[in-house]
């Protein structure tokens, strides 16, 4: 766990996107990051969030009903709150999020890129007006495409061209199908 992901407790999970670690502090999820934590202690909250992530990666519609406390500016937290309202399998443009949270589409993109709890705070559901947009997680837009495909997003198929981007749900090592 790096200083950027310092927390009281952590739980590392094997997912189809590789090892991911949930971090908890003060009774709330504070981060979800790629990689593993060395010395970590599990809690009921981490086990609940981990179970929800496992169900999510199995393709179930999941409501992440766990307390979240992402560290960020007031604007970033507003953006992340709006992102949490985007339903499973749907997308919103950076411009739409900007209108709801205040600010510009570019500022929304920066806030989405700084999201410390990806997947649970679904920054992958935010797309550019003219295309897929970026994604700051390991794998970049390939990972974004995989998450959108997992949710059955109706996003235009031509954006998914150019590679096998589906999540191998049986993998716990991060292999793409």
Image: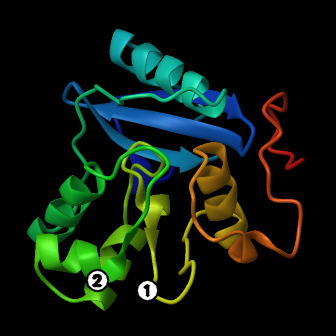
Q: Is residue 140 visible?
A: no
Q: Where is residue 113 in the image (x, y as percent from the top left)?
A: 42, 72
Q: Disc 1 on helix, strand or loop? A: loop
Mark before the other along the chain sequence, 2 or 1: 2
Q: Using the image, tell me which numbered label, if any, was put on residue 72.
A: none
Q: Position of residue 94 (x, y in %)?
A: 34, 79
Q: Can residue 126 be seen in this view?
A: yes
Horizontal relation, residue 12 to residue 112: left or right? right
Q: In this view, does 152 lie above or below 111?
A: above
Q: Using the image, tell me which numbered label, if any, was put on residue 129.
A: 1
> Is disc 1 surrounded by few (<14), some (14 to 19) or many (20+) residues within 10 Å?
few
Residue at 62% x, 51% y is: 147
Residue at 51% x, 23% y is: 50
Residue at 25% x, 49% y is: 85
Q: Distance between the residues labelled 2 and 1?
A: 7 Å
In the picture of the structure, the residue carrying the numbered disc 2 is 95
> Is disc 2 surrounded by few (<14), some (14 to 19) or many (20+) residues within 10 Å?
many
Residue at 21% x, 24% y is: 27
Q: How many labels does the image show?
A: 2
In contact (CB < 8 Å): disc 2 and disc 1 = yes
Q: In this view, does 71 lie above or below 16?
A: below
């Amino acid at each position: 766990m790096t200083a950027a992901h310092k927390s009281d407790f952590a739980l590392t999970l094997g997912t189809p996107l590789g090892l991911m670690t949930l971090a908890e502090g003060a009774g709330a999820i504070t981060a979800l990051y790629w990689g593993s934590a060395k010395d970590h202690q599990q809690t009921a909250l981490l086990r609940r969030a981990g179970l929800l992530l496992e169900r999510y990666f199995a393709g179930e519609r999941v409501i992440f009903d766990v307390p979240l406390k992402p560290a960020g500016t007031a604007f970033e937290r507003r953006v992340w709150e709006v992102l949490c309202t985007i339903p499973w399998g749907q997308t919103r443009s950076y411009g739409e999020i900007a209108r709801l949270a205040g600010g510009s589409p570019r500022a929304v993109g920066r806030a989405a890129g700084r999201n410390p709890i990806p997947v649970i705070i679904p920054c992958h559901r935010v797309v550019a007006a003219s295309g897929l947009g970026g994604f700051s997680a390991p794998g970049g837009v390939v990972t974004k495409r995989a998450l959108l495909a997992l949710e059955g997003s109706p996003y235009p198929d031509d954006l998914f061209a150019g590679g096998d981007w589906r999540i191998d749900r049986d993998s716990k090592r991060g292999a793409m199908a």
